[in-house]
Image (cartoon, rainbow, N blue to C red):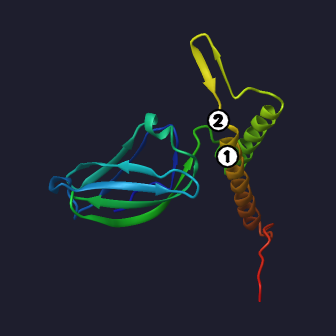
Amino acid sequence: MAVEPSRVRANTTVYWERVLSDYSADDSWTATYKLNASGLNTITITTTGSGTTHTVDSKPATTTGWAAGDYVWVLLVNDGTDTFELDTGTIEIVAENATGNDLLDAQNYLAAAEAELGERVTGKPSSYSIKDRSLTRMDEGELRKTITYWRKRVQVLEDAERRRKGQKSKRIIHARF
């Protein structure tokens, strides 16, 4: 029985159980989820097994590092010798401070990243130290990569919103005949 959530929030406890009747932890089977999203790091979640129940229990210390985005997950089982892909699906990871409105969140993140880049151009330091403490912000290349990601995300979400309202996409589709 599949019980993977369709949406989870970063920096919270993420918990679910999956029963795999043919792959008991008592027979040395471990279940692992691999989450992949374009342009983001792969997230690997190893379950804890008890009999045929395999449990995901990722604590905030782990999920705080998860980047927001739409992921495709793959469920793999391994007994030390063989590995099998059992299932796939999708999951959305939302940022911990998300409003619940994905488009608004994406627009806010984009605006914040663009503002940070603008401040860098006017001389804001990328790092500084005071006594025994220091702060290093992401470098300009990472910041530009972040802006590119959020611009694309805003475009995708705006397009989805237009389609939901029955309007045409703003995307230009080129075709050659």
Give residue 3's position: percent from left, percent from top. 39, 57
Helix, strand or loop status at disc 2:
loop
Nearest the eye: 135 or 73: 135
**Left or right, 132 with reference to 31:** right
Residue most toward the top?
131
Residue type indicated by callout 1: Thr
How crowded pointer 1 is (Cα within 10 Å; few <14, some 14-19, many 20+) is rated as some
Q: Residue 127 — which label?
A: none
Cβ–Cβ under 8 Å for marks 1 and 2: yes
Helix, strand or loop status at disc 1:
helix
Quarter the C terminus occupies:
bottom right
Residue type indicated by callout 2: Met
Give residue 107's position: percent from left, percent from top. 74, 47
Please state which of the two labelled residues, at mark 1 or mark 2, is closer to the viewer.
2
Nearest the eye: 108 or 161: 108
Q: Gap in Å between the C-alphas at discs 1 and 2?
A: 10 Å
Residue at 63% from the left image edge and 42% from the top image edge? 98
Hey, which quadrant is residue 22 in on the image? Answer: bottom left
Give residue 165's position: percent from left, percent from top. 77, 65
Residue at 78% from the left image edge and 77% from the top image edge? 174
Quarter the N terminus occupies:
bottom left
Give residue 40's position: percent from left, percent from top. 55, 52
- Earlier sequence position, callout 1 versus callout 2: 2
Residue most toward the right?
122
Residue at 44% from the left image edge and 34% from the top image edge? 61
Q: Residue 138 — which label?
A: 2
Hey, which quadrant is residue 137 in on the image? Answer: top right
Q: In this view, does 99 lie above or below 76?
A: above
How crowded pointer 2 is (Cα within 10 Å; few <14, some 14-19, many 20+) is rated as few
Q: Residue 146 — which label?
A: 1
Hey, which quadrant is residue 39 in on the image? Answer: bottom right
